[in-house]
Amino acid sequence: MSQSKRSVVLVDAVRTPFGKAGSLYAGTRADDLMVRALRGLLERNPRVDPSAIDDVAIAAATQSGDQGMNIGRSVALLAGLPKSVPGYSIDRWCAGALTAMTTIAGAIAMGAYDIGIAGGVEHMGNHPMGEGIDPNPRYLAEKIVEQDALAMGNTAERLHDRFPAITKERSDKYALRSQEKTAQAYADGKIQRDLIPTATRTPELGWTVATVDEPPRPGTTLEGLAALKTPFRPAGRVTAGNAAGLNDGATASILASEESAIALGLTVKARMVTFAFAGVEPEVMGYGPVPATEKALHKAGLSIADIGLFEINEAFAVQVLAFLDHFGIADDDTRVNPFGGAIAVGHPLASSGVRLALNLARSFEEHPSVRYGITTMCIGLGMGGTIIWENPHFNGKGGK
Amino acid sequence: MTLSPDLELPVGAPEEVITHALVRDVDLTSFGYKGSLALITLDNGEDHNRPNTFGAKSLSALDAAITDAASRKPSAIAITGKPFIFAAGADLSALAFLTKREQALAIGKYGHDVFRRLGELDIPTFAFINGLALGGGLEVGLHCSYRTLSSTALTGLPEVFLGLVPGWGGATLLPKLIGPERAVQVIVLNALNNNTMLKSKDALALGVVDAVYEPADFLEKSVAFAASVLSGTVVINRHDYSQGTAWDNAVEIGTKAALKKYGGATIAAPTRALELIAASRSASRTSGFDSEDQTLADLTMSDPLRASLYAFNLMQKKRKKVEGAPKPALARKITKVGVVGAGLMASQLALLLVRNLKCPVVMTDIDQERADKGVAWVHAELLKLVEKRRMSQESAHRLSLLISGSSDQSVFAGCDFVIEAIFEELTLKQSLFKSLEKIVSPECVLATNTSSLSVEAMSEGLDNPERVIGFHFFNPVAIMPLLEIARTSKTDDATTATAVSIGKELKKTMVITKDAPGFVVNRLLTRFMGEITDAMDEGTPPEVADNSMRSIGFPMSPFELLGLVGPGVALHVSETLHKNLGDRYRISPTMAAMVKAGVRTFYIKDENGQSVANPEAVALISTGQSPSSASEVRTRALTAIAEEARMMLDEGVVSSAAEIDLCMLLGAGWPMHLGGILPYLDREGISDAVCGQRFHQPGVASLP
C-alpha cells in the first residue's frame, strides 16, 4: 500500500481569555482551563463528531499537579469526550502547542489520523517557570551551556549584546505598538470572537466569567516603558514592559486532513505547508525563529518574500526585532502581528503556539491577497519553531 | 448591621457558620447582550463537607449582597454557590435552641424578607444552582425569575421529612410555578418517601428548573442562558395553575400518602404543608409568606419538631460514630467470610457481605443441594441488580465468582469472620461453634445473627470465647440500616472492633449492646406487642387493640407488623424472652394457636385489595372476659415501653437513652416526630408516671 502525504488544514482554533499569573485564574485549575477551551472549541464546531477525533495532543511546559497525569488524556476525559478518544501530552516548553499542532499534522499527513486536537495550557500562577527543574550539573561544569541560558530574561539581554543595533528604545517602541495593535484589535472586536468565556472563582471574590484578556495595558506610553526597571542586569534593556508577562491560559485547535474537512463540511482556516524546528546556542534562545524559519522556507521551496503575514511570538521584543532585522523587515511592518502579540495579551508558555495560528487564520480572512503566512516562536534551551501556512482564501491577486 | 433581638443566636446554640455572599460583575457582551450581570456567590469558606446554610447572619449577608448587586445597575442579578454546593437550607443547629415563638417567627420572616427581594426587583433574577440545593437553598432559587441546574446536582425540599414545611417561600411559590400535583410530589410525597431528592432530569421535567447544564461549563452555560433570556432569544413561558381542577385531588393524594406513612395518624408537618399548598392557589405572595411564617413558628415551637431534629441529628451522628466502639486500629483484616446456613436469611447475609466486602464468601448447609440453592439465590439477586442497572455486569461477574456453597464446613478454613444464621436453637448453635473452632483460626470472629438467644451461652466451652459476638440484622437486611452488636462478658476489643469495621463496610448504623435477651429492638417491640395481644386475649376486640396506637404515627399497627414478622418468629422470640426476662413477657394463647394452625396473618386482602380481618385468625382468638378500651390499651402499651426501656438502661444493655431511640428509629422504623420513642414518653408524662424520671432532659428532644 502506498503512502502519500495528505494536505493538513486548520479547521478552527480558540482560547480562553489569558490572565496574569495567579490573578484572574488564581482559584482555577490548569486542567479546567484546558477543558473549557476544548469544550468551547467543539461546541462551535458541531460538525466534528467527538468520537471521530483520532487523538488529543495537549502541551504544558510543567507537567505535574493540575498539568500532569498525562494532561492530554486527562483533559479528554474531563471534557466529556468519548472514552474511546485517546490523548497524550506534549512538551517543548514555549512551543508546546505549536509542537502539538505539528505532531498531529504529521500523523494526519502520513494518513494515520483524519482529525485531531492540538492545544496547550500553562498556569504559571500554579506552576512558576522552572518549577521542579533539576539541571544536570554537567551543563555548567562542562560549559555545555552558559549560565545565562537557564534564565530567559538573561538570554534576551544576551540577544541585545549580540545585536547592538537593537536598542532598548527600539524594543520599547515595538512593545508599545504591540499594546496599541492589541487595543485596536479589541476595539474592532477581533480578539473577543475567539475567546471562550471561562468561569473562574476565588474563595475571597466568588465566581465570575472571564470574557476578555487580563494582561493588556491599553494606556501604555513610551515614557512609562522607559521608566521601568531592568530586572535582569543593571543598565540592561529587557523590562517587564518589553517582554511577555507571566500568564495563565489555554488554547485548542482542530486539525484535519483536507479531504475529511471537505467531506464533513468543516471550515478550513489555514492549510499547513510545512514546518521546521532548529536549535541555536541556548544563551541566545531568542534567535531560534531565524534558523527555524530559514529551514522551513527551504523545505517549502519558498523565500521570505513569499510570506505575506507573520505571527511571531513576543516572548521579548528583542527577539522579534532580531528576526525582523535578519529578514530585512521593518520594525513596524503591518504584516507582522497585526493584532498585537504576547507582550500585550500574554504568553502562557505552552499554550501560545495555537494562539499564533488562530491570529494568522483571522488575518488570512482579512487578506485574501496573501498566499502564505508563518507562525514562529523562540523556545528555551535554544530553539525556534516555524510553521508555514497557506491561505485557503487566497484569491490569486496580489501574488503573495 | 445589627439584627433584631429575636434574631440573635439563641442561648446554647453553636456559633453560626456564616454563608458569605460575594458579588462580582459578569460582562454579557461576549454572550450577545449589551449589559452586565451581577453575580452573587454563596460561600461559607469551608469545603463541600460543610454546605452553605442560612442562619440570621447569613441572611443578613445575602441581604447586603442583593443591595450591593442592585446598586451596580446590572441587567440582571444571579446567584450561585461554592463548588459542588449551592445551599443546604436553613441553619437547623440554632432551631433546637429557640425558646420563644417570637424568635421562630422572626427567623421565618427574615428569610422571607431577604429571599423575596430576588423576586421583586425590577430586573430579572437567576439562580444558577451549581450543586446541592436543599430546602431553603432551593427556595432561594424559587424566588428568582429563572433557574438553571447542574446535571449532577441533587435538589429537593426535605422540610416535611424533618417535621417542618418549606417556609421560606417554597410552599407558596412552588405550587404556583409547577402546579399543585407536582408540588405535592416534591414537597410531600418525596419527603415522606425516605426524603427522596430530585435528580436534575426530574427537576427539569417537573418544571422546578428551566435548564440543565453539565457541570464542566455550568456557569458559562448558565450565563449564556441568562443573556438569551435578556435578549429575548429564549422565552420561558409560565403556566397559570390557579384555575385548574387539580388542587383538591393533589391535596387528597398528599393526605393519603401521609396517612399511609404514619399508619393512619395525622401528622402535623405534611398536614400543614398541604394546607399551605392548597392556600397558595389564591394566596398573594405576602399572604402566602405570612401563613408560612405562622406555620413555621407553630411547628418550630412544638415538641414533635424538637424530637424530630433530635432524631435527625442522632441518626446523622451515629452513622459515623459508634458509641463505645474500641479503637478502629484493633480491627483485623477481613479477606474471607463464612455464612453458616443457606436459607433466605443466610442468603441475604451472604449477598450483603459479598456486595460490600468484595471478598470470598462461603456458605454451608446440611446438604449440597441447599447450599447450591443459597448460592443460586445470590446469583439471581446479582442479576436483578444488573437488570435494574444498579450494578455493572463486571461487578456482578466479580461478585458471583466470590460466592460459593458447600455441605462441608471445612470450607470455612481461612475465614476471618463466620456468621451463623441457622435455626434459633441454642444447643445447635453451641455445637456449631464448637465444630467451627476446629476449622478456623483462633482469631476468626464467630458471629451470630440470633435475635434473642444468649450469645454468651453460645461461647461457653469454646477455647476462644472472646471471639464470639452478636451481629443482629433486621429484615430485609439489605435495606434496614440498623445492626445491633452484642458483646458478651468475654468478647474482646479486637473482636468488637472487627465486627464494627465490617458493619461500617456494610454501611450500617451500629449500636453496641450488652448480651441481653432480645438486645434492644426485639426486647422493646416484643414487650409492646405483648401488651396488645394480651389485651386482645383478655377480651378486647382485636380491632380495638390493634388500632389503639394509630394516632401515634407508627408506620404499621401491631398486627400488621406481626404479619410481616410472622407469628412463628414472634412466638419464638416471646417464648425466649419469657424464659429469660420473666412473666412480663407472656405467651399469647392466640399466637400459639395461630402458629399451630399455620395461620400466618391477622389481615388478608379482600377482592378489592383492601386489608380486612382474616377470619381464620379471628376464629383462633382466645376471648377473655375483661376487655379494655382503646385508650387503656394504649396507656398500658406505652407504660410497658417506658418500664422496659428504663430497665434496659438500669441493666446497662446500652449506655444511653439516645441509643434506645436510635435502635427504634432504625430497627423498627419508628418515626422521627416521636424522637424514636423516649422523647414521646417524656412529653406525654409517661416516663415520669412510670419511672419517676424522664429519659431526656427538657430541651434535648423537646421544647425546653
Image: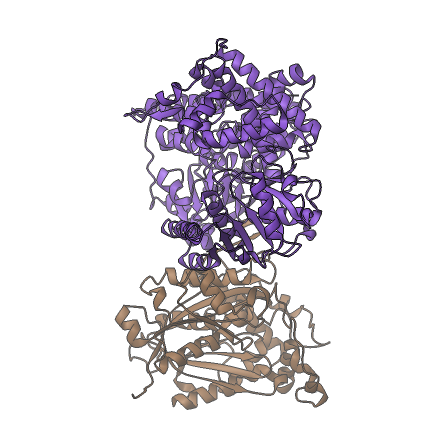
Chain colours: A brown, B purple
Please state the horizontal and vertical placement of residue B41, each as a whole percent of the image: 55, 44
Q: Nearer the viewer, residue B124 or B512?
A: B512
Please state the horizontal and vertical placement of residue A75, each as a whole percent of the image: 48, 64
Please state the horizontal and vertical placement of residue B187, each as a whole percent of the image: 44, 31
Using the image, determine if residue B257 lies above or below residue A168. Answer: above
Q: Quadrant of residue B207?
A: top left
In this rendering, does residue B256 appear at all?
yes
Using the image, determine if residue B396 lies above or below residue A246. Answer: above
Q: Quadrant of residue B251?
A: top left
Which residue ends up furthest to the left in the rendered image?
A: A263
Q: Quadrant of residue A296?
A: bottom left
Task: Report the side of A230 relative to B27 (left or right).
Answer: right
Q: How many numbered discs?
A: 0
Task: Report the side of B291 relative to B444 (left or right).
Answer: left
Please state the horizontal and vertical placement of residue A58, each as a whole percent of the image: 48, 70
Using the image, determine if residue A283 lies above or below residue B343. Answer: below
* Image quarter in which the N terminus of chain B is found: top right
* Image quarter in which the C terminus of chain B is found: top right
In this rendering, does residue B172 appear at all?
no
Q: Nearer the viewer, residue B578 or A390?
A: B578
Residue located at (35% from left, 26% from top) = B604
Using the image, determine if residue B489 lies above or below residue B172. Answer: below
Task: Report the side of A190 relative to B680 (left or right).
Answer: left
Q: Nearer the viewer, residue A53 or A256?
A: A53
